[in-house]
Image (cartoon, rainbow, N blue to C red):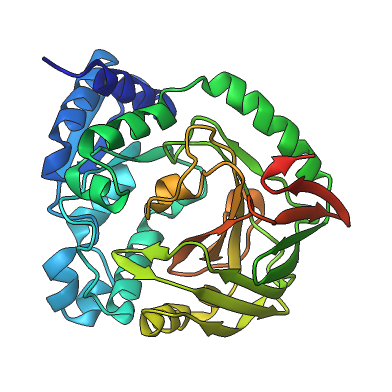
């Protein structure tokens, strides 16, 4: 018997892209995601939408990225580029068999491949075409979270099958306060960082591209970050790599000092990908009440209620972001134990609770 939660999940994901009859939708996944892929294709078909299924063994590029000449990694094939250009939208249904796949790919190679993909997907990143990315529960993702598969399934569906209308209304009120502010200050363990949102408005993600939603995010003023941030509570995870104890010092919006207690070589290599990799592309506020613990999965971790996340690398053009980079690496900072957020000198959140 099919799991009714998967059917509800598929309907929700298709709602996120709101397709029109006749559209062509790229549906990307891995073999373990078959139950969700089938339900999504069924739902698209009911709405008179054509599903173009593309299955890979991993989401990083695997042996191709490890072995191909660098000049080949730096551009997409004509067939790849044509389907990205002509599709009306795409859905990325991530279903990992091994979450460490790609961890042996050097930062230089990963960066070149990511740059080629990001260039092709610019219309989606600018909000001109809809897309949605999500996870399907697999044993590998459950292990990363320290859960059994049934526990992880309950967690995932508890984070996505919620009252999005009510959560969206609560987040809109928070966004109004940040939209009206200029200077943000983040204080926490090993952290005292300020940056500006002057003239920038945020986006409330209550049912959008990243599923689960539950965040408010901005592109900070590119040269405004000053101070230090320490990601001492949780590892920073990116394309199969796990980096612990990341610490950055910013001057004039740029990272001038960087260190980590593990995998520091990958961190520094990623920062050297291009000029934009050392600047902030995103400031996000986690608001999803169904996510309360870190599980080494950024798609969920950045939504933890009572945390913030900052992404180094490319910003969001639709939010005024001007920074450009081949990377976009979100790192989560815990504020529920002694942290606070200030707006223009006034404390608005303390210990993860809104004042």
- 333 and 28: which is toward the camera: 333
Which image quarter holds the C terminus? Answer: top right
- 233 and 202: which is toward the camera: 233
Q: Quadrant of residue 80?
A: bottom left
Q: Residue 133, image x and y in percent?
A: 36, 42
The residue positioned 57% from the left and 54% from the top of the image is: 316
Q: Residue 281, image x and y in percent?
A: 58, 62
The answer to whether 125 appears left or right of 11 in the picture is right
The answer to whether 243 appears left or right of 166 in the picture is left
Q: Quadrant of residue 10?
A: top left
Q: Quadrant of residue 64?
A: bottom left
Which image quarter holds the N terminus? Answer: top left
The residue positioned 72% from the left and 64% from the top of the image is: 221
Outermost residue toward the right in this view:
345
- 295 and 115: which is toward the camera: 295
Q: Is residue 250 above or below residue 292?
A: below
The residue positioned 39% from the left and 60% from the top of the image is: 118
The answer to whether 62 appears left or right of 254 in the picture is left
Q: Residue 135, image x and y in percent?
A: 30, 41
Q: How many marks?
A: 0
Q: Is residue 118 above or below residue 34?
A: below
Q: Residue 37, image x and y in percent?
A: 19, 32
The residue positioned 19% from the left and 36% from the top of the image is: 52
The answer to whether 2 appears left or right of 105 in the picture is left
Q: Would residue 124 be visible to someone looking at this image?
A: no
Q: Would residue 215 be visible to someone looking at this image?
A: yes
């Amino acid at each position: 018997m099919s799991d009714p939660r998967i059917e509800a999940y598929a309907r929700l994901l298709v709602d996120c892209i709101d397709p029109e009859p006749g559209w062509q939708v790229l549906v990307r996944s891995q073999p373990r995601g078959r139950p969700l892929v089938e339900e999504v294709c069924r739902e698209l078909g009911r709405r008179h939408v054509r599903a173009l299924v593309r299955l890979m063994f991993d989401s990083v590029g695997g042996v191709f990225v490890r072995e191909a000449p660098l000049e080949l990694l730096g551009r997409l094939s004509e067939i790849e580029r044509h389907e990205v250009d002509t599709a009306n939208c795409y859905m990325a249904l991530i279903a990992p068999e091994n979450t460490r796949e790609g961890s042996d790919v050097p930062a230089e190679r990963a960066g070149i491949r990511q740059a080629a993909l990001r260039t092709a997907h610019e219309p989606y990143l600018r909000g001109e075409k809809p897309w949605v990315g999500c996870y399907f529960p697999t044993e590998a993702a459950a292990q990363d979270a320290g859960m059994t598969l049934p526990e992880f399934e309950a967690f995932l569906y508890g984070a996505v099958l919620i009252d999005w209308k009510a959560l969206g209304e609560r987040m809109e009120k928070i966004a109004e306060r940040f939209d009206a502010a200029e200077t943000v200050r983040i204080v926490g363990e090993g952290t005292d960082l300020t940056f500006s949102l002057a003239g920038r408005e945020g986006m409330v993600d209550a049912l959008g591209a990243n599923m689960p939603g539950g965040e408010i995010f901005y592109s900070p003023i590119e040269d405004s970050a000053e101070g230090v941030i320490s990601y001492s509570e949780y590892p920073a995870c990116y394309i199969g790599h796990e980096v612990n104890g990341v610490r950055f010092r910013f001057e004039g919006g740029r990272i001038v000092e960087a260190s980590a207690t593990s995998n520091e070589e990958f961190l520094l290599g990623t920062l050297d990908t291009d000029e934009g990799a050392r600047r902030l592309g995103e400031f996000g506020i986690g608001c999803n009440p169904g996510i309360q613990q870190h599980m080494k999965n950024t798609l969920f971790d950045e939504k933890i209620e009572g945390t913030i996340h900052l992404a180094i690398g490319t910003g969001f053009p639709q939010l005024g972001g001007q920074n450009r980079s081949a990377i976009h690496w979100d790192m989560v900072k815990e504020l529920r134990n002694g942290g606070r957020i200030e707006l223009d000198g006034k404390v608005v959140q303390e210990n993860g609770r809104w004042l």
